[in-house]
């Protein structure tokens, strides 16, 4: 198949979760023998006219990458370059990653009668507490109508959780499909027994993320300080950067000797950091994200999958679907979200029994390879694309 794939406003290559997703899907479909054209942005998109005339194109990891460097909020301005790309490529199917201010790909596909797939990774209609929703309501709901129209134009939709999509869209045209991990890149380069039983250094508990409020980084710092006060010997490493990093680092200051904050890292360096660790923590807090409270935990937990691929036992919140990915006592331990004392207890269970923790890490690796790899994601996605383009 010839596939035109739009990820408006997403930098590729890049270190964001969306960057990883778009890159891995384009790469995975190309590895399966398809000709993939991915439309994304470079690292620093600026508002200028050049992209509206001609995208900057290159080859990357077996697929064609076209940079249309416009800020996300004006993504619909790419509609005519996208139409020209569609005419030049003559794709069998168009895929687009849903975003409030995007939709050029789905519109162009509908106009040209080309089958299309809409990827939905967030709640399409925000809850009323969100300013964007209140503004849209005040203006007569133009954004809502545009979003729902894209759902109806699309031949099919994929999403980690069906509750992200308005109820008036037929459930028969929706497939739940989780993200995955690059199980090759995150595989440990040495036997896990050697890494886990090395007693020269204290175990490392690791967090990776963009420090959004709902990522729970501050909860992990509070739990870490409690564990250190209780006499546990371990270190805590926080990978990445974002809005709450400074607050988390200030909270950790009384025991700065036991914490390390890396700041922003190239994505290619993340596996090596995970390989130094003994436990991966994803302390999600849905109360900090109103949309998650309204629709359930619809984010596909990339960091959880990558911890698993690195053979780490995972500590995460006891809520669906996280508690179906990480089963308590099998691939890691669960805690009551927002409760840092219970989070500390969940981490302590692994620190106190390193042999069991190692076994859980091995089981996590086996589970992600079997069910949550990008290879599996792309194989299932391929079947959907073949069906709608037939």
Image (spheres, rainbow, N blue to C red):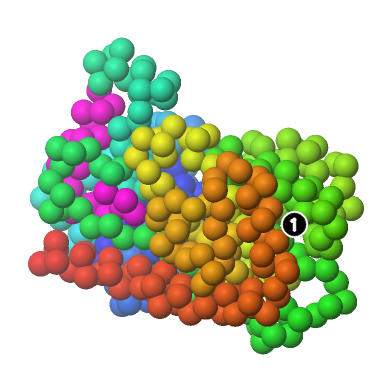
Q: Is residue 196 magenta?
A: no
Residue 59 x, y percent position in the rendering: 45, 66
- Judging depth in this view, the residue of 350 and 250 nearest the camera is 350
Q: Residue at x 14, y 61 (%)?
A: 388
Image position of 81 with respect to 20: above or below: above
* Image coordinates for residue 200, horizontal then vertical, percent: 87, 77
With 280 as the anchor, is 276 left or right in this view?
Answer: right
Does residue 240 appear in this view? no
Q: Which residues are magenta?
A: 142-162
- Quadrant position of the C terminus in the picture: bottom left
| Secondary structure mainly formed by the magenta segment | helix
Residue located at (64% from left, 36% from top): 243
**Crowdedness of circle 1 by 10 Å Cα count: few (<14), some, many (20+)?**
many
Q: Where's the N terminus, which quadrant? A: bottom left
At x 40% / y 53%, what residue is drawn? 320
Q: Nearer the viewer, residue 378 or 192?
A: 192
What residue would you read off at disc 1? 237
- Figure check: 34 above or below 82: below
- On the image, the x and y values in percent for residue 268 come to 62, 65
Q: Residue 190 vs residue 261: left or right? A: left
Secondary element under disc 1, as helix, strand or loop, is strand
Asked if residue 157 lies in the magenta stretch, the reply is: yes
């Amino acid at each position: 198949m010839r596939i035109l794939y739009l990820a408006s406003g997403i930098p590729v290559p890049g270190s964001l979760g969306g960057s990883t997703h778009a890159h891995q899907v384009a790469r995975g479909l190309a590895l399966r023998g398809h000709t993939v054209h991915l439309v994304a942005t470079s690292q620093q998109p600026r508002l200028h006219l050049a992209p509206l005339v001609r995208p900057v194109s290159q080859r990357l990891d077996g697929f064609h990458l076209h940079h249309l460097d416009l800020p996300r909020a004006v993504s619909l301005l790419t509609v005519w370059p996208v139409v020209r790309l569609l005419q030049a490529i003559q794709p069998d199917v168009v895929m687009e990653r849903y975003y409030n201010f995007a939709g050029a790909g789905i519109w162009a596909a509908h106009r040209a009668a080309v089958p299309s797939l809409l990827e939905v990774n967030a709640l399409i209609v925000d809850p009323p507490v969100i300013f964007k929703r209140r503004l849209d309501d005040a203006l007569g709901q133009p954004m809502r109508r545009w979003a729902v129209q894209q759902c109806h134009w699309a031949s099919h939709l994929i999403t980690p959780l069906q509750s992200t999509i308005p109820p008036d869209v037929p459930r028969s045209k929706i497939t739940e499909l989780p993200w995955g991990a690059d199980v090759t890149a995150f595989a440990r380069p040495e036997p896990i027994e050697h890494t886990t039983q090395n007693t020269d250094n204290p175990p490392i508990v690791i967090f990776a993320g963009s420090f959004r409020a709902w990522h729970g980084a501050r909860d992990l710092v509070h739990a870490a300080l409690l564990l250190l006060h209780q006499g546990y010997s371990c270190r805590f490493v926080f990978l990445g950067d974002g809005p709450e990093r400074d607050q988390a680092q200030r909270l950790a200051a009384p025991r700065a000797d036991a914490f390390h904050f890396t700041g922003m890292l190239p994505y290619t360096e993340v596996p090596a950091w995970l390989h130094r660790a003994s436990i991966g923590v994803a302390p999600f807090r849905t109360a900090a994200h109103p949309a998650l409270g309204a629709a359930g935990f619809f984010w596909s937990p990339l960091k959880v999958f990558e911890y698993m691929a690195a053979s780490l036992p995972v500590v995460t919140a006891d809520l669906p679907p996280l508690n179906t990915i990480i089963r308590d006592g099998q691939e890691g331990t669960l805690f009551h979200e927002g409760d840092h004392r219970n989070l500390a207890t969940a981490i302590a269970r692994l620190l106190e029994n390193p042999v069991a923790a190692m076994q859980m890490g091995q089981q996590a690796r086996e589970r992600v390879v079997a069910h949550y790899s990008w290879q599996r994601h792309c194989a299932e996605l391929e079947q959907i694309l073949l069906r709608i383009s037939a």
